[in-house]
Amino acid sequence: QVQLIESGGGLVQAGGSLRLSCAASGRTFSNYNMGWFRQAPGKEREFVTAISRSGGSTVYADSVKGRFTISRDNAKNTVYLQMNMLKPEDTAVYYCAADRAILIHNSISGYDYWGQGTQVTVSS
């Protein structure tokens, strides 16, 4: 089992920045690829970004490319999501997830463990 706890969400104006953190406990953190997903009201959960075990590979949804950056610190068992140039359409609950697959991917069903989420609200 891997327990994931997100933090760092909040209310920010459009154009602002937030950094989300996801602290992991349980199994060896560096054995897992990590991903961030989000779910806006009335919409399905969608992929945002993912990072490989070592941090050497990342992938982003087109909607956040160039604005969001995922990173991880395996010594601290933590993955981060730096969000810049935020837009009202980025408003959602953000979830981190852990995955044991060999390669990073954007498939929600492939992630094994999920956090409870943290709310991000971007005002216009």
Image: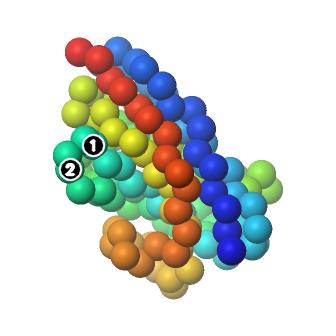
Does residue 102 appear left or right of residue 61 in this picture?
right
Does residue 111 appear left or right of residue 65 in this picture?
right
Q: Residue at x 41, y 32 (%)?
A: 120
Residue nearer the viewer, 2 or 74: 2
- Secondary structure at numbered mark 1: loop
Q: Can residue 30 be seen here? A: no
Q: What percent of the width, then of the height, locates residue 31?
A: 67, 76
Residue nearer the viewer, 5 or 53: 5
The residue labelled by disc 2 is 43
Q: Are marks 2 and 1 in contact (CB under 8 Å)?
A: yes
Residue nearer the viewer, 113 or 47: 113
Q: What percent of the width, then of the height, locates residue 13?
A: 35, 15
How far apart are labels 2 and 1 at the CA level?
A: 5 Å
Q: Is residue 78 above or below residue 81?
A: below
Q: What's the residue type where badge 1 is placed?
A: Ala
Q: What's the residue type where badge 2 is placed?
A: Lys
Q: Residue at x 63, y 57 (%)?
A: 4
Q: Residue at x 49, y 40 (%)?
A: 118
- Label 1 neighbour load within 10 Å: few <14, some 14-19, many 20+: some
Q: Quadrant of the N terminus?
A: bottom right
The circle on residue 40 is 1
Q: Can residue 73 be seen here? A: yes
Q: Quadrant of the C terminus?
A: top left
